[in-house]
Image (spheres, rainbow, N blue to C red):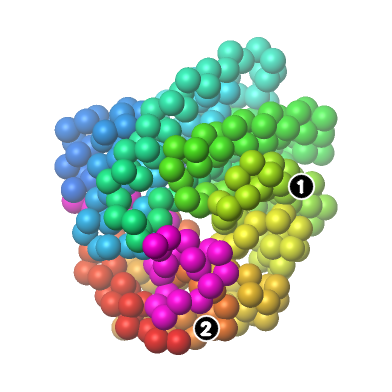
Amino acid sequence: MPGLLLDTLNGKRGDRVPLWLMRQAGRYLPEYRALREEKGGFLAMAYDSEAACEITLQPIERFGFDGAILFSDILIVPHAMGQHLEFLAGEGPKLSPPLVEAELDGLAPDRSRYDPIYETVRLCRQRLGADTTMLGFAGSPWTVATYMVAGEGSRDQHEARAMAYRDPLKLDAILDRIVAETIEYLSGQIESGAEAVQLFDSWAGSLAPDEFERLVIAPNARIVAALRAKHPDTPVIGFPKGAGEKLPAYARETGVQAVGVDETIDPAWTARELPAGMPVQGNFDPLLLLAGSDRLEARARVILEAFADRPHVFNLGHGIDRRTPIEHVERLIAVVRAFEG
Ligand code: CP3
């Protein structure tokens, strides 16, 4: 039995809507905070396969979600490509040297960094029940490039967006390398037991239309085509956060089997604009889940109704906030499980 989530990603509508939450393995869980206290930093845990598998399974044990997302980070790929990676308390991730000043050719890649991640996937798949889907992931080339270029997060992805105009050949070369790395990395996850994979494009929303075609759609399309050739039965979920009115073009042109939708997009519009039958994932606002007001149940039902005519995976529009009370998560799960339609 392949599981309700996997069936849904493959285009079937079951008698219940499957559910998982982005960042479901993370700091809102007391059991995660306890393990982090014991093990030290985030990155050390991501490379410790036993710890990472335990964290991946924590939300499954507590809530019984339909999918388990690998506990890891999108910045593992730049690390394996040879940038130094650190998470500084209160400052977020630092990658050095930043590619705005350094050249890609000067980096010393080390693909053995992927090995503990593959081991995490293998352990999780062994330990999960057959009806829970194991999800792998990677960042999309544009989003990963914004960190590689600037060496850190930024409010508006300024350095990479400027490079797209000032030095397009340099940015294209960086994206080409990330595309090749991501194909390798996601294939490795699939061969280790990931049953579906998600491409996270957290900063897809910061681009003008021509740049969206060139920097978001084209590189993702190359990854999807290569994965489809090697692993035709493994669905790819594309999540172009902030894509807005560019979402239908992304859905048609990248070749992804399912599309993730953030909370700023009207689900009724999405249901009309996406190709008929295409599975959709989303799009509950993580801040309404944090607030947990009396609008929580009503909003969840609006989303469930809007997507009732196509395969739907219930999820948030972005990662769960770390201050979210557990009771609010339980309330959301109850509405989704009670929905018949
Ligand atoms: O749903 C998922 O778990 C998908 C995997 C994923 C994670 N981070 C897991 C994670 C994805 C797609 C990301 C994206 C990411 N990571 C970005 C892009 C922007 C975004 O929010 O989508 C950035 C900048 C990072 C780097 C990063 N990772 C930061 C700044 C932090 C917090 C710092 C810290 O020390 O904890 C992380 C940690 C991280 N990444 C966690 C998880 C589950 C740990 C716990 C948590 O914050 O709840």
Kindly indicate whether the residue at mark 1 contacts the one at mark 2 (C-beta within 8 angstroms): no
Neighbour tally class for label 2: few under 14, some 14-19, many 20 plus, Cα within 10 Å: some
Percent from the top left, x then y, of residue 275? 70, 73
Amino acid at pointer 2: Ala
Would you say the beta carbon of the disc 1 residue lies within 8 angstroms of ligand 1?
no
Q: Which residues are magenta?
A: 1-30
Residue under numbered circle 1: 218
Give the quarter of the figure containing the N terminus. bottom left
Q: Earlier in the sequence, mark 2 or mark 1?
A: 1
Q: Is residue 22 magenta?
A: yes
Question: Looking at the picture, how far across and down is residue 318, in whole percent?
Answer: 47, 59
Q: Identity of the amino acid at label 1? A: Ala
Question: Which residue is under mark 2?
Answer: 308
Can you tell which mark lies on residue 265? none
> Secondary structure beneath disc 2?
loop
Q: Nearer the viewer, residue 171 or 340?
A: 340
Classify mark 1: helix, strand or loop: helix
- In the rendering, at what x and y percent does residue 308 appear? 52, 83
Whether 18 is among the magenta residues is yes
- Residue at image position (48%, 31%) is 76
Residue 282 can be seen in this image: no
Asked if residue 185 is positioned above or below residue 301 in the image, the reply reads above
Image quadrant where residue 73 sits: top left
Observer-side mark, 2 or 1, equals: 2
**Residue 324: x %, y % from top left:** 29, 61
Tell me the quarter of the image containing the C terminus.
bottom left
